[in-house]
Image: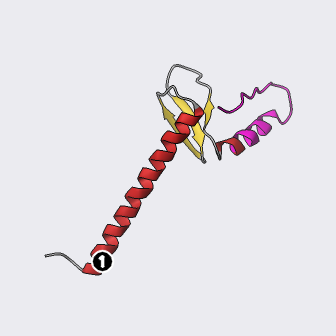
């Protein structure tokens, strides 16, 4: 799990520094935002935000999201192959 970063009011640049750290971390591993109220966890990973009612480690979330992306990529590849095959073979009768 990513390190816990504390933002203290009155320290110049702290929020910007924190954002820079989190932006860097989320490129390789999901970063969870603190739950301020009862509800879904919010994760930042590879420039996308995700939410869900899941109590999991950063590593578990990474595996789940990477598997989802792989599944979506495969679906796009299958669709592309289907469209290309239809264009090559012409209309079916």
Residue at far top of view: 38
Residue 41 screen position, x and y as percent: 53, 29
Boundaries of the magenta span: 1-23
Residue under the point 71% across and 45% down = 24
Image-quadrant location for residue 34: top right
Residue 11 among those drawn in magenta = yes
Residue 76 screen position, x and y as percent: 40, 60
Q: Relative to 32, does residue 49 appear above or below in the rendering?
A: below
Q: Relative to 36, does residue 3 appear above or below in the rendering?
A: below
Image-quadrant location for residue 79: bottom left
Residue at the spot of label 1:
87
Q: Badge 1: few (under 14), some or many (20 or more) residues near its Cα, within 10 Å?
A: few
Residue under the point 74% across and 29% down = 5
Task: Name the side, left or right, on which 2 lies relative to 44.
Answer: right
Task: Name the side, left or right, on which 62 lies relative to 53.
Answer: right
The C terminus: image quadrant: bottom left
Task: Name the side, left or right, on which 91 lies relative to 49.
Answer: left
Residue under the point 68% across and 33% down = 2
The N terminus: image quadrant: top right
Task: Name the side, left or right, on which 87 lies relative to 11.
Answer: left
Which of 25/49 is in front?
25
Q: Relative to 82, does residue 46 appear above or below in the rendering?
A: above
Residue 8 among those drawn in magenta = yes
Residue 29 screen position, x and y as percent: 63, 41
Residue 26 screen position, x and y as percent: 65, 42
Which of 20/65 is in front?
65
């Amino acid at each position: 799990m990513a390190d816990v970063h504390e933002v203290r009011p009155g320290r110049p640049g702290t929020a910007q520094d924190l954002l820079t750290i989190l932006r860097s971390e989320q490129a390789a591993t999901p970063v969870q935002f603190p739950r301020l109220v009862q509800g879904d966890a919010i994760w930042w990973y590879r420039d996308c935000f995700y939410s869900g009612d899941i109590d999991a480690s950063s590593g578990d979330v990474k595996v789940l999201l990477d598997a989802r992306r792989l599944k979506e990529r495969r679906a796009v590849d299958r669709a592309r192959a289907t469209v290309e095959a239809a264009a090559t073979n012409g209309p079916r009768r």
